Image (spheres, grey):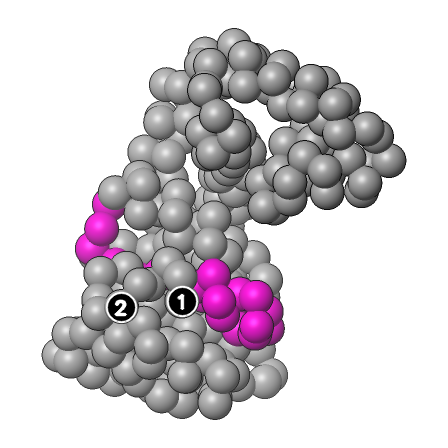
Amino acid sequence: MSSMIKIGIVDDHPLLRDGVTMALKKIADFEVVEQGGSADDALEIAARFAPNVLLMDVNMPGDSFAAVRAISASSPAVKILMLTVSESIEDAYSALEAGAQGYALKGISGLELVQAIRNVAAGETFITTKLASKLLSNIRKHSGDKQKFELTHREEQVIREVSKGLTNREVAIKLELCEKTIKHYMTNVMYKLHVRNRTQAVAAVLRHWEGDHISSLCGALQRRDLNDNGKLSHES
């Protein structure tokens, strides 16, 4: 790659942070612009230095997922790659849903980390193969539950707007329907999702959409592995 890839590193373990920094500085087109140890540091680094890729741990002082969400909204050019020991499916879901471009485990090799950073910098997604397998397994395990409900086009429109925090009245105005009709659609949605209120309905349908999204990311990962199986061994 001809241009430099600017990298920020945020992890609350200084030794690991310094080790990653030293390793990445050996890559000719990588430039580590700043380091930090908390979610607040991540926000500041994204705003002040605008790195191409921001490496972030999941478990560190502050709310990492909220920071990912805020950075994704305010600085979309900053691509986030989670680098963590957490193999939790929930953590992976939360990070990807918040806007992270990748999720890598700290046990990956240096060459894999370099490739992950390149992928994320190019706008692609990277998920550690081991974790991707767990994600796919989890999605398949619950695929039967997801197939128990099918929303109509209008029901999906309504729940999408409700998930943004809109009231029934606001949804009615936006979709040019009457408020009573919106209530009818929401009743149908809650019945299909087997939930008792709007909050539960939004949580259920977001997880449903999130699973579809991550399934598609994992599919892309598998295709990448098939197409690029020999790339890492030739990385300099």
The quadrant in which residue 104 appears is: bottom left
Amino acid type indicated by mark 2: Gly
Q: Are marks 1 and 2 in contact (CB under 8 Å)?
A: yes
The residue to which callout 2 is attached is 62
In this view, the residue in front, 41 or 83, is 41
Q: Quadrant of the N terminus?
A: bottom right
Question: Is residue 84 rendered magenta in the image?
Answer: yes
Local crowd at mark 2 within 10 Å, few (<14), some, or many (≥20)? some
The residue to which callout 1 is attached is 67
Q: Of marks 1 and 2, which one's residue comes earlier in the chain?
A: 2
Please provide percent x and percent y for residue 216. 55, 37
In this view, the residue in front, 16 or 88, is 88
Residue 125 can be seen in this image = yes
Magenta-highlighted residues: 68-87
The residue sitting at 15% across, 74% down in the picture is 13
Label disc, if present, on residue 89 of the rendered structure: none
Look at the numbered disc 2 and give the secondary structure of its residue.
loop
Question: Is residue 120 rendered magenta in the image?
Answer: no
Residue 38 sits above or below residue 81 on the image: below
Drawn side of residue 37 relative to residue 187, left or right: left
In this view, the residue in front, 46 or 152, is 152
Look at the numbered disc 1 and give the secondary structure of its residue.
helix
The residue sitting at 67% across, 23% down in the picture is 183
Drawn side of residue 202 relative to residue 113, left or right: right
Please provide percent x and percent y for residue 124. 56, 57
Residue located farthest toward the right when viewing the structure as drawn: 176
Amino acid type indicated by mark 1: Ala
Please provide percent x and percent y for residue 93. 39, 43
How far apart marks 1 and 2 lie (CA) works out to: 8 Å
